[in-house]
Amino acid sequence: MKQLPGETIRLLSSSQVITSVVSVVKELIENSLDASATGIDIKLENYGFSKIEVRDNGSGIKVDDVPVMAIKHYTSKISSSEDLERLTTYGFRGEALGSICSVSEVLVTTKTAADDFSIQYALDSNGHVTSKKPSHLGQGTTVTVLNLFKNLPVRKQFYSTNRKCKEELKKVQDLLTAYGIIKPDLRITLTHNKAVIWQKTRVSDHKMACMSVLGTAVMSSMVPFQQCCEYPEINLSGFLPKAESDSSLTSLSSSERSFIFINNRPVLQKEILKLIRQYYSQATQKDSTRLYPVFFLSITVPASAVDVNITPDKTQVLLHYKESVLLAVENVLKSLYGPLPAAVPGESNKTDVTSEDMFVHRTDQTDVAVNEMGPSGNDELHAHTSFLSLSSDVQNCQAGKNAEICLNHQTFSGDNVHSRLDKREVSKSDAFPDSSLNLLGEEEQNGRNMADIQSNSVPVDPESKKA
Ligand SMILES: Nc1ncnc2c1ncn2[C@@H]1O[C@H](COP(=O)(O)OP(=O)(O)O)[C@@H](O)[C@H]1O
Ligand SMILES: [Mg+2]
């Protein structure tokens, strides 16, 4: 047995972190957001394979930190694993810049508020600074990535077709859309070969952010919601399609407009997506089970209740009390769409998500299955449904003139009530003894503009702050 040369080790581990153009863009914009940027400009040439440039107006990198900024496992964001309990930043592993250096040529131009002028640094494949020169750029950081995958010919070949390149560009745009929604006050532009192909201006809140990226027609078919649960601490907010919405407006054949965030991080959560699809498709009476509703769901839990260190791209997360989060989501869905019909034994579930889909990247998760669903995921979801289908001791409370439906007094009967609740009623569960659900009654929405609705429903999420 022989130990691999350092260069090879670096290349192998880096190419797991940096798998595509979109993964470079994701890492760089997350660095910009961690540096409190309010404006990010992304410029691609040749779909990013010739050049990716991400410029921000954030805090910049201190001169003292420059020599180690791209050395693997150097980070300004955490000092030890205990800090993960209080994580407020997207980054924490100190891997991205170093990994990008291993698979491309990198220039970093940066200036902090204390610096007189910016300096451009050239880095080698180990992340060491090889040269520097003054630059005219203002405060913030610009990372320029040239010749991506120059030393990974198979990967480069994989992305060599026009179709793959266009798919990659679409993924970049979808990624920016997600950050555009979760960060309303962020300005973003995406330029490809010198043409601006997508942009978002700064807006005041999530509703305006959704309006700007999803369009007003779609947003007028959406209903805002908010659910708070004190123990365990879970906050849900966002927008879902109204039960009577036109599904040609509020759904797509893919999940690209199904936005789920956990602590401001865009995540793939197939179980939550499946739940939302189930309720949405029964409410809109759509046969086509392939429809993915357009929605925005922001889940906030204490940092200590999430493990984001599951996959290199951090899109998979483990929640310490995932079942409670699923129940909270289901509570919102029931209130909006009514309960799901009872499962007929032996009949397959209405949506076409297989039990395998319940495990995203199964191999990644098998050895860390905290609160994992059982292999019979569908059955377990019905168990939740039964648990949440409760007796009708409903409390409708008028929240001033806005007449919000409030859910805060709950009794659990354990009955399996599958009849659809009246639209004015809400389902209840002592699974959330301290929870409150605010879902604006549909009648109240008619004739009210979205600004009114928004001001009552969706608080601005706590923003990530650099540690
Ligand atoms: N755009 C940026 N603005 C300010 N600092 C940055 C930026 N990009 C990188 N850095 C600094 O470089 C360090 C290394 O970045 P990275 O390799 O992505 O690791 P991580 O984000 O996990 O800390 C960061 O901790 C941060 O201090
Ligand atoms: Mg980073």
Image: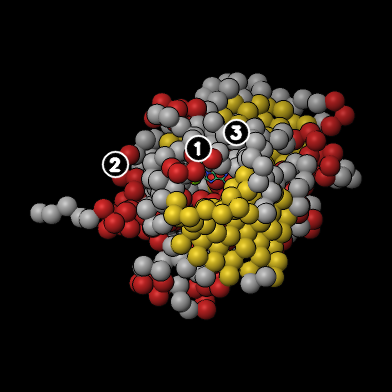
Is tag 1's residue or tag 3's residue first in the polypeptide sequence?
1
In the picture provided, is 302 more to the left or to the right than 206?
left
Seen from the viewer's position, the closer of residues 76 and 402 is 76
Quadrant location of the C terminus?
top right
- Residue at x 41%, y 57% (from the top left corner): 124
Q: Position of residue 371 (x, y in %)?
A: 39, 35
Q: Distance between the Cα atoms at labels 1 and 3?
A: 21 Å
Q: Where is residue 2 in the image (x, y as percent from the top left)?
A: 13, 54
Would you identify the image quadrant in which residue 114 lies? top right
Q: In this view, does 189 lie above or below 96?
A: below
Q: How crowded is mark 3: few (under 14 residues within 10 Å), some or many (20 or more)?
A: some
Residue at the extreme bottom of the image, as rendered? 162
Q: Is residue 292 left or right of residue 210?
A: left
Q: Which residue type does callout 2 highlight?
A: Asp
The mark found on residue 64 in the picture is: 1
Which residue is more in the foreground, 88 or 267?
Answer: 88
State left or right for residue 157 relative to residue 338: left
Mark 3–mark 2 distance (CA, rounded to whole Å): 31 Å
Which label sits on residue 465?
3
Mark 1 or mark 2: name the one nearer the start of the chain: 1
**Would the CB of label 1 be found within 8 Å of ligand 1?**
no
The front one of 317 and 350 is 317
> Residue at the spot x=63%, y=72% of the render?
193
Per the image, label 2 sits on a secondary structure element best described as helix
Q: Mark 2 points at which residue?
A: 367
Whether residue 125 appears in this view of the structure is yes
Which mark, by number, is residue 73?
none
Can residue 386 be seen at all in this image of the molecule?
no
Whether residue 106 is situated above or below residue 299 in the rendered picture: below
Question: Looking at this view, is 298 or 311 the one in front?
Answer: 311
Name which residue type carries label 3. Lys
How far across and down, in percent of the image, does residue 275 sit? Answer: 53, 47
